[in-house]
Amino acid sequence: MLRPLLELLNGTAFRPDPINSEVRMAERFSGKTVLAVGFRPGLIKAAPVRFARNGTVTVGQESTAAWAQNDGADVIRRFVQKAAGAAKTEDVVLVGSHQWLSNLTDITFPGSDRERNRLLVEEPNKIVGENAGEATVLAIVTHPTVSRTLKFAFTKAELLTDCAIFHGTGLRLSRLSSGCYAILRYLAEEAPESIKGKELLIVDGNSALMVFSNDTAWDDSGFVSGFRNAAEAAEKVGELVSRRTDPTARLAVVSTIELDAETAKLTGSNIEHLLTTQSNPDFFCVCSEGKEHVATDLNPEPSEPRPHLPKSRRAFVFSALAISLGCGAGAVAVNLATLREVREINAAHEAQNALISEGARISEAIGRIERDRAKADLLGKWVSLGVSVQPIIVTTVESADNGVSLDEFSLRTGDGAPQMEMKVVARGDSRRIGAYIDKVSNAFGAAGFNLSNLDQTPAPGANAIIFVGRYNYPIPSKISWKKE
Amino acid sequence: MNSRYLPAGIIVAICTVISVVALNSLNARAANVHADLGVAKLDLQEAQNKSIDAKAKLANASAGSKQVDQFLGSWGLYAEEGNALGGIVDKLSKLAYERNLITTRRPTPTREDYPFGAVSATVQVVGFGVSGSYSSILDWLGEVEAAFPYGRVESVIMRGRSNDIEMEIQLTFMIGITADGRTHASK
């Protein structure tokens, strides 16, 4: 689950698996490099093959090493690993030539190329006949002008032997092919004009294939293999060329090795060498495929490739991802903005609370000031209305002479009222008492009191008067005195 | 989409839907928060305005408070004196003793409904009686009034003659205000 998801996210799901032989190599390795390896008895060679994004294939600098059957597979493995490291790739294309072409049969198949290739993969017997046994791996090439198909039958056991060499390298075997097959397929499918009306000779280092152009059936009589060296190859190629019925007919030649022209009978103006710009035409042809044709992978036991999605789906998936990422980015932005606003809210609340607290303190201070004012006001009134009664008593009592005696004397204020009531029970001559009362009133007046009213009533007994005088306190003008 | 990527594709689709829904939800929440921010700013502005008003009121109220403090500082101690009934009586007795006066004392409950101007005050009333010579009693009264400038002699009753005078006085000390809800003046 996780791996497909990751492949979907990083785009791998839309790229074909490098080992998917049903997909053109240019598509599998677009913008990448693979290592092409070819070996035959005595020699192993390798070269990086670069697949440009525009579809062009470029074979790079070749490296070679001597190899003998006695050396074992380790020599090949080390060489391949070193070359792959230099090419910075993990994908290897193996181009073999030794002993693979065990059968070469001309067959007729009138179907289209697409149909032929499909059937070759799915139902090979319909193309190659009933003898397509399980021990054989097939590849076919249809002549570009003659409605004939050449069948290559490879022994599966030999292919597996070659595949096994690479199992210990840690590299991916992206394609297993044959030099002759690959070159013939390339010329027939991708460069048919170059071989139309010509006979064709293909030499891949260990075998040579002669395709006669006599409008008759192809057969295996044009194939020889098992070269041990270039001299032997030139000799056997010469034998093939000499079998031509019309030596003057044009002969197209593709060779991956240097041949002695005289021995190979490849002299004359009718000889046309093809793919001369390619230092390794077999590597180039193995890796070059048109948009319509996919070369057959001879790997008899290919690994199950990872399926891939058509690129048209990528827009949907990436759109979904873009939406998700956009939403995610939007969510982050919204969250950040919200977080900032939440902080602003908290700051506003804190400031508001601080102001409220300050307001409470101010209110408390105002309350305290008002209480102090009230207290001071009250104290002021209380203190201002304080009157020393002792001088009044002295004046009142000591004025009672000259025949006036006092039976009782009292001073009283009424429950805090700014009024003092003086009660005197005086005895004596009425005229003297009147004078006394005037004197007392004057004394009160001198002390700041104002006479409010004066009552005089006779007291029991002779010449006695109850005198009650009410005097208002001397209230300072700055003090308001309102009794509710 | 082949079976290898179908579950992953479903997950991507679900994630996309969740992302869209979550973003919408976040947007709604952000809108609420934004609205809350507006309210908070308005509240803050209102609080700032109130604070400015309160400071102005405080400044206004503080004007002249120094004189009030000075006045309270001058008379506060005397005002506190009214709360100490035992101390008042002791002082009255002491002054009477120094004048060789005989003392009498009456129960003096605290009153809370004492009318004083526009307010109703709480007062401590101290009734005290002395008997002795006229001059001693009046001297004693003068000393009492001098000793308790905050005390208000609200009642003086004097009977008798010459060297056998009885005097009852009633000293009132204001210790608080109750009727209009303001706190006690002496506190």
Image: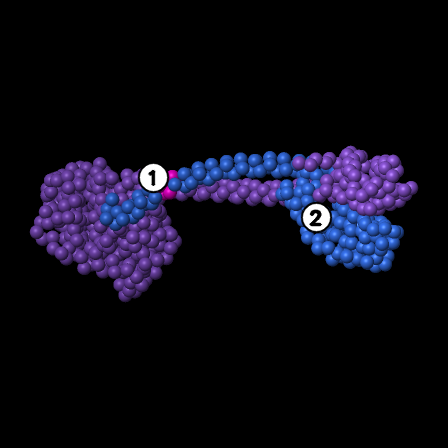
Chain colours: A purple, B blue
Quarter of image, res B105: bottom right
Labels 2, 1: front one: 2
Q: Which mark, residue A335?
A: none
* Residue drawn 13% across the image and 49% down it: A124
Report the Cα–Cα distance between label 2 and label 1.
Answer: 89 Å
Q: To which residue does mark 2 refer?
A: B123
Q: Say if residue A231 shows up in the picture.
A: no
Can you tell which quarter of the image residue A249 is in?
A: top left
Q: Secondary structure at mark 1?
A: helix
Q: Amino acid at mark 1?
A: Ser
- Tell me the SS state at disc 2: strand
The circle on residue A319 is 1
Task: State the residue at coordinates (85%, 54%).
Answer: B164
Above or below, comparing residue A373 to residue A81 in the picture: above
Q: For this rendering, which residue is in front, A239 or A160? A: A160
Question: Does residue A430 sit above or below B135 in this rendering?
Answer: above
Which amino acid is tagged 2? Val
Would you say B148 lies left or right of B29 here?
Answer: right
Prevailing secondary structure of the magenta residues: helix
The segment highlighted magenta reads B19-24
View extreme (bottom): residue: A70
Q: Is residue B159 left or right of residue A198?
A: right
| Image quarter of the C terminus of chain A | top right
Q: Are labels 2 and 1 on one chain?
A: no
Please provide percent x and percent y for residue A153. 15, 52
- Label 1 near label 2: C-beta < 8 Å? no
- Residue B21 highlighted magenta (yes or no): yes
**Residue situated in front as seen by the camera: B77 or B81:** B81
Place of residue A95 in the rendered image (x, y in percent of width and height, measured from the top left):
26, 52
Q: Position of residue A131 (x, y in %)?
A: 9, 53
Q: Residue at x 41, y 38 (%)?
A: B28
**Chain under callout 1:** A
